[in-house]
Amino acid sequence: DAKTTQPTSMDCAEGRAANLPCNHSTISGNEYVYWYRQIHSQGPQYIIHGLKNNETNEMASLIITEDRKSSTLILPHATLRDTAVYYCIVRVGGNFGNEKLTFGTGTRLTIIP
Amino acid sequence: DAMVIQNPRYQVTQFGKPVTLSCSQTLNHNVMYWYQQKSSQAPKLLFHYYDKDFNNEADTPDNFQSRRPNTSFCFLDIRSPGLGDAAMYLCATSRDRQGANEQFFGPGTRLTVL
């Protein structure tokens, strides 16, 4: 699986949009971009994933660049409960999927009141 | 609500004393995973079961074993815990391991080794 690079930490004001970047310059054509987050002392929680197109769900939006070498997770209206470590993971999908989620160091997002 | 349950949430054991952590799921998922997460580190996959098929990661120590007696339950056995095995142990499930299948994690069991 392709490696990812994320900033170590970020702050965001409560109520503002939090934009978390991720670089995955060696991503392959059949690899998906996944985002998980881990709130302190809890198990990781799935947020969203995408292959090529931008995706949106009730939690967040995922913007993937056209060359797929980077992506941005957007939390549109951050709340204090969004304070967590956010992991960007690249993983093979399709019928030849690799079952492993390889977590990197992630971004520690702190929402400031 | 369908979920992944881990018991106990906190487990204390003595150096070298075998310990078993348990995980159950109500999602009826085919795949169950065990991850180890040490303090201030990212989760690391130890092994997984695809149905009854056990898949070990190459760098998982022999001290760690697993059992899956049925679809709903999976156990992590640590045969002789060392101080370095103190960690959060996370169980996760997914419907399948192919395709874009998200993993659902339990709350974890924090293991302390005295």
Image (spheres, coloured by chain):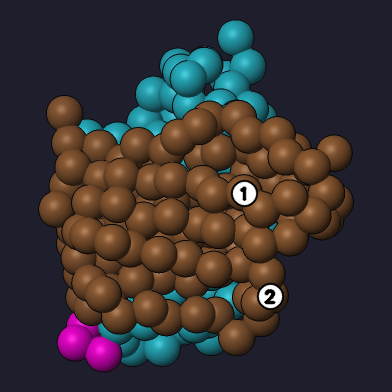
Chain colours: A cyan, B brown
The foreground one among A60 and B7 is B7
Q: Residue B51's quadrant in the figure? A: bottom left
Amino acid carrying mark 1 in the image: Val
Q: Quadrant of the C terminus of chain A?
A: top right
The percent coordinates of residue B81 (x first, y second) are 75, 55
Decide if residue B19 is in sight here: yes
| Residue occupied by mark 2 | B61
- Disc sitting over residue B19 in the figure: 1
Q: Residue B4's quadrant in the figure? A: top left
User: Magenta residues, as a range?
Assistant: A92-96
Does A63 appear above or below A23? above
Residue A95 lies in the magenta-colored region? yes
Label 2: which secondary element: loop
The foreground one among B103 and A9 is B103
Amino acid carrying mark 2 in the image: Pro
Mark 1 / mark 2, whichever is N-terminal: 1
The percent coordinates of residue A60 (x first, y second) are 32, 40
